[in-house]
Image (cartoon, rainbow, N blue to C red):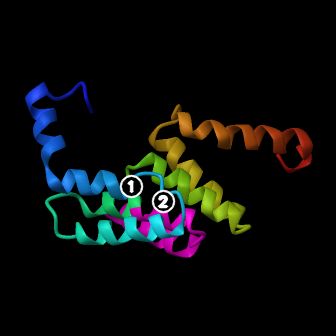
Amino acid sequence: IRDRWSESERAAIAADPQVTQLFAAIQNPKDQDDARAALVALDALEGAPTEQYMLNLFAANIHAKLGEIGKAKMLIGTALEENPYIVSAWIDLGEFYFLDFDPTGAWFCWDIARRLHPDHHLLVKTSTLEQRLAEKYPYFF
């Protein structure tokens, strides 16, 4: 992102109060109170001149950190309805399904991510898991 814009454009973006609010909201919250405050800040941005699906992805990550996986899955699903080409969202959604003991749902999501970007660096974890499973349970593959 930094390489795409001139110094004056970067300065204008950094000075934008909504950008400042957004970055403050999506910083890694240290505790549940920080995370809840981040969600409130994200909600305040609704209607801002930005893509709502991106705000949903930020909120989904915060909900996941709070252990609210169902809410996180719903928000990622909503984001993917608006823009189904976000590889990292498919990967995250797959991880949530995997944590819910739904490997079919997990691999469905991960396979979509692979079709979109087979060499995406976030798929390394999935590939490693598949290799471990194939070694340990070869009769399933």
Q: What is the three-letter code of the residue carrying label 1? A: Ile
Q: Is residue 118 magenta?
A: no
Q: Quadrant of residue 59?
A: bottom left
Residue for point 53% across, 68% down: 32
Q: What is the three-letter code of the residue carrying label 2? A: Asn
Q: Quadrant of residue 101?
A: bottom right
Q: Is residue 133 left or right of residue 73?
A: right
Would you call the spot at circle 2 few (<14 residues within 10 Å), some (14-19), or many (20 or more)?
A: many
Q: Is residue 90 left or right of residue 140?
A: left
Q: Nearer the viewer, residue 48 or 27?
A: 27
Q: Give residue 14's position: percent from left, percent from top.
A: 18, 41
How far apart marks 2 and 1 lie (CA) works out to 9 Å
Question: Which mark, by number, is residue 26?
Answer: 1
> Mark 2 or 1, which is nearer the eye?
1
124, above or below 61, in the image: above
Q: Give residue 136's position: percent from left, percent from top.
A: 91, 43
Q: Which region of the structure is painted magenta?
A: 59-84
